[in-house]
Amino acid sequence: MPNYLNIIQIVLSIALILVILFQVRGGGLGGIFGQADTVYRTKRGIEKTLFQFTIVLAVLFIVVSIITLIVS
């Protein structure tokens, strides 16, 4: 049983890393040249979906980690 949990945990961690890397953060090089990157804007469309999916994956990762700790 712990082998399956370890595989699930590895898959969740890779998915979590990929989803975090897909998210857009900051203004990139625009901040160097004086572009304001602190403008407030709401998350819409795919950006909102990625944000919510990141939260779900993080919660699942934590739950699987706790279950693995309890089982072993």
Image (cartoon, rainbow, N blue to C red):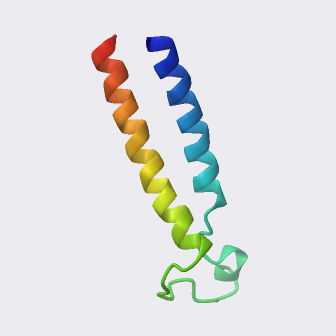
Q: Which residue is drawn at 58% across and 77% down?
A: 45
Q: Left or right: 1 with respect to 27?
A: left
Q: Tell me which corner region of the image, top left, top right, bottom left or bottom right, holds residue 24.
A: bottom right
39 in relation to 24, above or below: below
For the residue pair 2 and 37, the one nearer the viewer reads as: 2
User: In which quadrant will I find the N terminus?
Assistant: top left
Q: Which residue is drawn at 59% across and 33% down?
A: 11
Q: Which residue is drawn at 54% across and 67% down?
A: 49
Q: Where residue 28 sits: x, y (%)?
A: 68, 73
53 in relation to 15, above or below: below
Q: Left or right: 38 with respect to 34?
A: left
Q: Where residue 65 sits: x, y (%)?
A: 38, 28
Q: How many marks?
A: 0
Q: Where residue 46 sits: x, y (%)?
A: 61, 71
Q: Give the farthest residue toward the left.
A: 70
Q: Where residue 34 sits: x, y (%)?
A: 64, 89
For the residue pair 28 and 45, the one nearer the viewer reads as: 45
Q: Residue at x 38, y 45 (%)?
A: 59
Q: Tell me which corner region of the image, top left, top right, bottom left or bottom right, holds residue 61.
A: top left
User: In which quadrant will I find the C terminus?
Assistant: top left
